[in-house]
Image: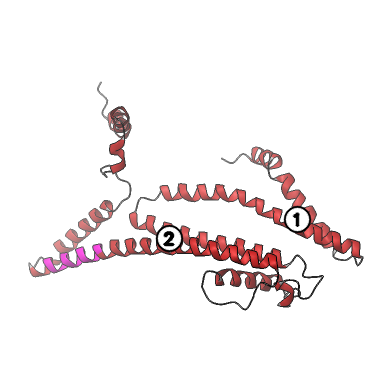
């Protein structure tokens, strides 16, 4: 089970100081927002520029990635495995565009208070809009860089131009690769489903042509459906994994022994 004390201790020794610093920074910005002096305003802008440190929290995403991979390893159906891979690609797309949108807003928010034409956020007059509207506007811009729709938001200073160029290059490489992977997965999924439909359609015609009675036809179809499902398992006792042929003979023997160890225990000699 979960050890609460151990979890608290690990958090206190790892991410707690960093999270405490970020929360303190947010409280400082909230308090500084009420001050009207120029010194406080400059200090507030300097503190806002440190909010990019929140991106360091993305180090936790590695743990999520490991968890997602381990969950996929538990899937035995080939169809479910492909569907899970498609889900992972969509999740990756959403996460990447979320990060891009947050970075785009962070760049535009640097000098939006000092000069009404200094950033895309100021030019678009979004500074006083709600946080949700600002976020989805930034997210819309991020998706527009992939060629999905259009956005009226444009870069108005050098840092924004540089960021836009970098994102365009990354999107060109990353999105094309993602589309290729998605197309391949969808084609594989469609092929599996078409093979099953074709096989059972042929079976129904065969049973009908030979005047097989409905009861026997039903039992034959159910048995073959079960057999077909077992055949499509990604993991089964009789499946042949080509890469295992590269194992050394001692490792192969040890692997086969481990596979059948339960059978040996069940059939122990007296």
Is 17 inside the magenta-drawn segment? no
Of residues 125 and 225, the one nearer the viewer is 125
Please give the name of the residue rendered at 77% of the width and 60% of the height, measured from the top-left corner. 48
Please give the name of the residue rendered at 51% of the width and 59% of the height, measured from the top-left corner. 92
Indicate the quadrant where residue 99 lies.
bottom right
Q: CA distance from mark 1 to mark 2?
A: 36 Å
Left or right side of 125 for 234: left
Q: Position of residue 270 (x, y in %)?
A: 25, 21
Of residues 213 and 171, the one nearer the viewer is 171
Q: What element does badge 2 sit on? A: helix
Label 2 Cα crowd, 10 Å radius (few <14 / some 14-19 / many 20+): many
Mark drawn on residue 86: 2
Q: Main secondary structure of the magenta part?
A: helix
Label 1 Cα crowd, 10 Å radius (few <14 / some 14-19 / many 20+): few
Say whether residue 38 is visible. yes
Q: Position of residue 262 (x, y in %)?
A: 31, 32
Mark drawn on residue 219: none
Q: Earlier in the sequence, mark 1 or mark 2?
A: 1
Please give the name of the residue rendered at 53% of the width and 76% of the height, measured from the top-left corner. 149
The stretch in magenta equals 195-206
Left or right side of 241 for 71: right
Mark drawn on residue 50: 1
């Amino acid at each position: 089970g979960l050890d609460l004390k151990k979890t608290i201790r690990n958090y206190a020794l790892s991410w707690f100081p960093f999270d405490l610093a970020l929360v303190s920074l947010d409280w400082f910005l909230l308090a500084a927002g009420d001050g009207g002096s120029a010194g406080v305003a400059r200090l507030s802008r300097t503190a806002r520029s440190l909010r990019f440190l929140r991106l360091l929290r993305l180090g936790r995403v590695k743990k999520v990635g490991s968890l997602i991979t381990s969950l996929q390893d538990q899937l035995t159906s080939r169809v479910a495995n492909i569907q899970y891979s498609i889900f992972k690609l969509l999740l990756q797309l959403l996460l990447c565009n979320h990060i891009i949108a947050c970075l785009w807003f962070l760049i535009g928010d640097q000098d939006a208070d000092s000069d009404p034409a200094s950033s895309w956020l100021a030019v678009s007059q979004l500074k006083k809009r709600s946080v949700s509207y600002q976020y989805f506007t930034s997210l819309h811009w991020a998706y527009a860089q992939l060629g999905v729709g259009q956005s009226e938001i444009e870069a108005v200073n050098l840092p924004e131009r540089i960021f836009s160029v970098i994102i365009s290059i990354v999107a060109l490489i990353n999105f094309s690769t993602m589309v290729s992977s998605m197309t391949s997965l969808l084609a594989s999924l469609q092929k599996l489903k078409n093979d099953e439909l074709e096989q059972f359609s042929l079976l129904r015609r065969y049973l009908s042509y030979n005047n097989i009675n409905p009861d026997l036809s039903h039992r034959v179809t159910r048995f073959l459906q079960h057999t077909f499902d077992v055949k499509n398992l990604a993991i089964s006792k009789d499946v042949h994994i080509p890469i295992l042929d590269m194992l050394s003979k001692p490792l192969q023997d040890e692997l086969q022994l481990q596979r059948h160890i339960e059978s040996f225990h069940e059939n122990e000699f007296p």
